[in-house]
Image: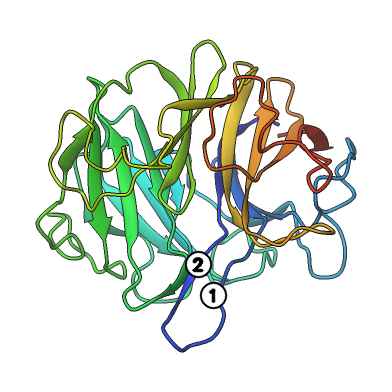
């Protein structure tokens, strides 16, 4: 069964001095054609396995379990870290959920979705957006927030910052306080098949020709239609091509990872893709947006042997 949506559910944050960040690396959610919400957790490092047995099994893994239902009316679903899920319904309402479970089977959607703010509407008017993606809450912080990026119908890139906890507010006021809500921070994002946030306010975009482009936003939502502020500066590398051949992918999702293969001593980004036939492919990106159309830099090397491997099927 093909999936309507697949989105990353890992990464998270803790307050300063509260311990290591809650990351849930490798966790992702899928919505099938029936609107069921399914849970997956990938524990591998990209080892080749078309059957999907390695990395999705083991005690407590729970991959493939249904954890909810009724998600067929969502046109965008975003994993925001700390278990927070934001969804946009066909009427444009921005809806809040927070999942605290570990994939325990529960078609009713009760387990793991406890709390007073499940399904609350926290904003409106997002049904006209071509793309929506987030920079999830991640790392140690004094005030967790979610950076939400939207691509309007004309290709303008808009910025929002949500600091709430799902309090009901259809007007979109609570949690969206601050001077830079809905500001335009760029343009020209019209002809992309996929745009996906991978953490640290970095995102990847795939135009119609299948090239993989890298962007890193370092601003704070300051109004700038030209896209100059926040996408330039030494080492920024925004709009560089870092790979190719992604035109056949139906889904793209990923996030920050601290999984370290032998001799690896730094954080990286996991990227998962679903091919047209439902195969699930794994990529690990260790670069910083250096220009490389061949896709060699950042995706290969002795510490990164598994990029492009198939790790599952049926998605």
For residue 12, which numbered disc appears in the image? Answer: 2
Using the numbered discs, state the Cα–Cα distance from disc 1 to disc 2 in whole angstroms: 6 Å
Task: Identify the residue at image location x=27%, y=60%.
Answer: 162
- Work out whether 49 lies above or below 243: below
Q: Do we see residue 144 in this rendering?
A: yes
- Residue 64 position (above or below residue 301): below
Q: Quadrant where the C terminus lies?
A: top right
Q: Are marks 1 and 2 in contact (CB under 8 Å)?
A: yes
Q: Which residue is mark 1?
A: 21
How busy is the neighbourhood of tag 1: few (under 14 within 10 Å), some, or many (20 plus)?
Answer: some
**234 horizontally vs 31: left or right:** left
* Secondary structure at numbered mark 2: loop
Task: Say which residue appears at 59% left-offset and 25% top-offset.
Answer: 292
Q: Quadrant of the N terminus?
A: top right
Total labels: the figure holds 2
279 displayed left or right of 120: right
Q: Nearer the viewer, residue 148 or 19?
A: 19
Rendered image quadrant of residue 153: top left
Q: Is residue 179 or residue 220 the one in the foreground?
A: 220
Q: Is residue 74 visible?
A: no
């Amino acid at each position: 069964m093909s999936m309507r949506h697949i989105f990353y559910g890992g990464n998270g944050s803790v307050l300063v001095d509260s311990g290591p960040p809650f990351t849930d690396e490798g966790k992702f959610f899928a919505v099938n054609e029936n609107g069921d919400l399914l849970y997956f957790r990938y524990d591998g490092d990209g080892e080749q396995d078309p059957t999907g047995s390695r990395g999705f099994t083991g005690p407590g893994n729970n991959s493939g379990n249904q954890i909810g239902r009724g998600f067929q009316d969502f046109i965008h679903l975003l994993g925001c870290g700390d278990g927070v899920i934001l969804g946009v319904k066909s009427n444009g309402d921005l809806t809040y959920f927070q999942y605290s479970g570990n994939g325990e089977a529960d078609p009713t959607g009760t387990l793991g979705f406890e709390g007073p703010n499940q399904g609350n509407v926290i904003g409106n008017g997002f049904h006209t957006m071509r793309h929506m993606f987030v920079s999830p809450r991640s790392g140690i912080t004094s005030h967790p927030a979610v950076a939400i990026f939207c691509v309007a119908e004309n290709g303008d890139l808009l910025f929002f910052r949500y600091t709430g906890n799902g309090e009901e507010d259809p007007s979109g006021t609570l949690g969206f306080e601050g001077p830079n809500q809905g500001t335009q921070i760029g343009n020209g994002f019209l002809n992309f098949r996929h745009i996906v946030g991978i953490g640290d306010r970095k995102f990847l975009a795939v135009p119609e020709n299948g090239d993989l482009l890298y962007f890193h936003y370092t601003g704070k939502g300051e109004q700038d239609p030209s896209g100059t502020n926040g996408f330039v500066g030494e080492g920024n590398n925004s709009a560089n091509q870092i790979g190719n051949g992604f035109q056949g992918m139906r889904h793209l999702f990923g996030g920050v990872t601290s999984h370290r293969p032998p001799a690896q001593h730094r954080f990286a980004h996991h990227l998962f893709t679903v091919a047209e036939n439902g195969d699930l492919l794994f990529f690990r990106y260790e670069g910083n947006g250096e220009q490389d159309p061949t896709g060699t830099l950042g995706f290969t090397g002795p510490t990164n042997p598994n990029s492009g491997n198939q790790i599952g099927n049926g998605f």
